[in-house]
Image (cartoon, rainbow, N blue to C red):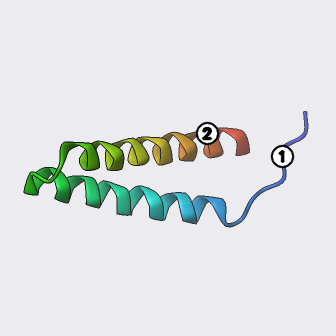
Amino acid sequence: MTKPPARKGARPLLWGVLVLSAAANAVTSALGVNLVLSTVFGVVTLAAGIALVANYRSRR
């Protein structure tokens, strides 16, 4: 089985999205900002984490 070609910029971008969205989620939750906005940041954080795991598993 052949491995897919590596995308060099995907992992750092995903890590950046993960960190920024997690921080934004924490801030919006702590300040009591609109629940919808906090939920959106949470979903983005979850999606970035899932994408990082999928990227890791595909490169193994």
Task: From this view, report whether residue 26 is shown above or below residue 12.
Answer: above
User: Residue under circle 1?
Assistant: 4
- Residue 51: image quadrant is top right
Q: Residue at x 39, y 48 (%)?
A: 45
From the image, which quarter does the C terminus lie in? top right
Extreme left residue here? 31
Q: Is residue 31 shown left or right of residue 51?
A: left
- Mark 1 and mark 2 lie on one chain; the one further toward the N terminus is 1
In this rendered view, identify the residue nearer to me: 14 or 56: 14
Q: Residue at x 74, y 59 (%)?
A: 7
**Whole-percent x and y of residue 49?**
47, 45
**Whole-percent x and y of residue 1?**
90, 33
Classed neighbour count for the residue bearing mark 1: other residues with Cα under 10 Å, few (<14), some (14–19), many (≥20): few
**Whole-percent x and y of residue 21?**
36, 57
Extreme right residue here? 1
SS class, disc 2: helix
Task: From this view, report whether residue 23 is shown above or below residue 43.
Answer: below
User: Residue under circle 2?
Assistant: 54
Quote the CA–CA distance across marks 1 and 2: 13 Å
Classed neighbour count for the residue bearing mark 2: other residues with Cα under 10 Å, few (<14), some (14–19), many (≥20): few
Mark yes or no: residue 60 visible: no
SS class, disc 1: loop
Mark yes or no: residue 34 visible: yes
In this rendered view, identify the residue nearer to me: 1 or 20: 20
On residue 56, the disc is none
> Amino acid type of disc 1?
Pro
> Amino acid type of disc 2?
Ala
- Residue 20: image quadrant is bottom left
